[in-house]
Amino acid sequence: MSTPTFRGGVNIAMKIPSDRYDDTLAFYRDTLGLDVEIEPDTPGEQVSRTARVQFGPCTLWLDQVDSATHHDLWLDLRTDDVDAAVEHLAQHGTPTRDELEPLPPRAHWICNPAGVPHILREPTA
């Protein structure tokens, strides 16, 4: 099997405890003056509210997680071959962590050594 290629994606998700969510939205919207769009539907079981912020070439997702006790940052990682990437990462001590949150098809969660989650998917996923 060939070695997959990896590149950063365009999505960053900030998981925010409910007691800090409104202040965080206000920071990006009112303090920084960025366009904050409240999403009408929540993306998953663990996220109770979410908003989209255009953050340069990336989309910053502000996700309220009621069970969270601290903030967390989740990154988007793209690959040309998900299956080869999962095998390659496992060989290098990085297993999938799909229990973290529901996923779209052909995607997996992994974590870097510092514990930062990355969604691993092909560009069209």
Image (cartoon, rainbow, N blue to C red):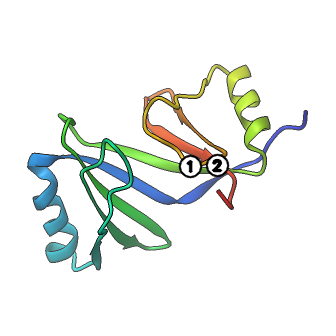
Per the rendering, the mark at residue 121 is 2
Per the rendering, the mark at residue 84 is none
Q: Around disc 1, counting alpha carbons within 10 Å, would you say few (fewer than 14), some (14 to 19), or many (20 or more)?
A: few
Which secondary structure, mark 2?
strand
Q: Does 46 sit above or below residue 11?
A: above
* Marks 2,1: beta carbons within 8 A: yes
- 79 left or right, relative to 36: right
Which secondary structure, mark 1?
loop
Residue 25 image point, x, y percent: 18, 65
- Give the residue type that dot 2 points to: Arg
Q: Around disc 2, counting alpha carbons within 10 Å, would you say few (fewer than 14), some (14 to 19), or many (20 or more)?
A: many
- 50 left or right, relative to 3: left
* Frontmost residue, 96 versus 32: 96
* Frontmost residue, 106 versus 97: 106
Q: Residue at x 48, y 59 (%)?
A: 11
Query: Where does label 1 land, which residue?
Result: 104
Give the quarter of the figure containing the C terminus: bottom right
Between disc 2 and disc 1, the foreground one is 1
Residue 20 image point, x, y percent: 12, 50
Q: Residue at x 52, y 44 (%)?
A: 103
- Give the residue type that dot 1 points to: Pro
Residue 84 image point, x, y percent: 79, 36
Residue 55 image point, x, y percent: 39, 70
Give the quarter of the figure containing the N terminus: top right
Q: Disc 2 or 1, which lies upstream in sequence?
A: 1
- 74 left or right, relative to 47: right
